[in-house]
Each structure stands twice: as structure tokens, then as C-alpha cells.
Image (spheres, rainbow, N blue to C red):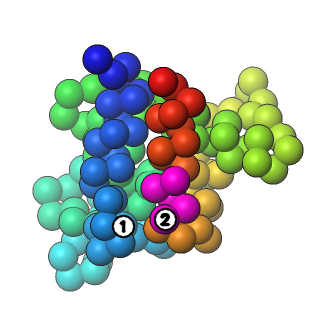
Amino acid sequence: MPTPSEFVLLEARKLIQTPTAWTTGCIARDAAGRPCSATAPEATRFSLMGALHSASRHRLSAFASEAACLLLGDMLAKRLGQKLPAVNGSKLAVDLVAVFNDIATHDAVLSLIDSALRKRA
């Protein structure tokens, strides 16, 4: 049985599995391409952060999406030869994940999630 953060990662991956379900430049978009909240019923396309938020909204607390984000942020920081600081680490993780989403390819975003899931296994 997956942990709450693994569940969020798995569900987030499902939400952005295809390039047409993924977005950049905002947390989520509706069917017309307009920015919207990741938890809005009309959201049809998600950034990585938006997918994490949306994946945890029904069954889990925000802590599960925060834990998943911290894991992804830590992995990105390590790729840069850094580590997340003890103070404000979650803020930096959010920033790293958001920027990565906006500069990376769709495949790279999915690969990051897959790497995080393998790391947790």
C-alpha cells in the first residue's frame, strides 16, 4: 500500500500523463486554456505543482502533497549540487518544482516523478 506522499505522486502522474493534460506558466488551466485553481472542477490541465495539489484534495491532507513536493524539490536541489535548507526548505522546494515544470519537457517532468517513486520503493 502506498504512503500518502506516494499516493499523491501516483495520482499527480496520472493527471499529467499526456502532454495535453500538462501545462506551464500557471498551476492549472480550464478547457479553454484559461488559468484556474488546481482544485477547481473546471481544471483540465495541470502543472506539476497543480497536479500535486489536485491529487491530494479529496482523500489526503495538504501534508501529503507537501511531503511529495519536498521529495521532488530535494531531488532537484541535489541535481544542482545543493540541499534544501532546514528553514524555509518547503518554500524552496515549491519554487524549484514550479521552475522545473516551466523549463523542462513533459517527459522530464514525468521522469522526475518516476525517479521519486523509485526512490521511495
Q: Quadrant of residue 22?
A: bottom left
Q: Is residue 29 above or below residue 57?
A: below
Q: What is the crowding at mark 1: few (fewer than 14 residues within 10 Å), some, or many (at least 20)?
A: many
Give the residue at x 55% y 50%.
112
Q: Amino acid at mark 2?
A: Asp
90 within the magenta span: no
Give the position of the N terminus as an image quadrant: top left
Which mark's residue is nearer the viewer, 2 or 1?
A: 2
- The span shown in magenta is 107-111
Label 1's element? Answer: loop
> Magenta residues: mostly which secondary structure?
helix
Mark 1 lies on residue: 22
Give the residue at x 55% y 42%.
115
Q: Sequence order check: which comes first, mark 2 or mark 1?
A: 1
Mark 2 lies on residue: 107
Label 2's element? Answer: helix
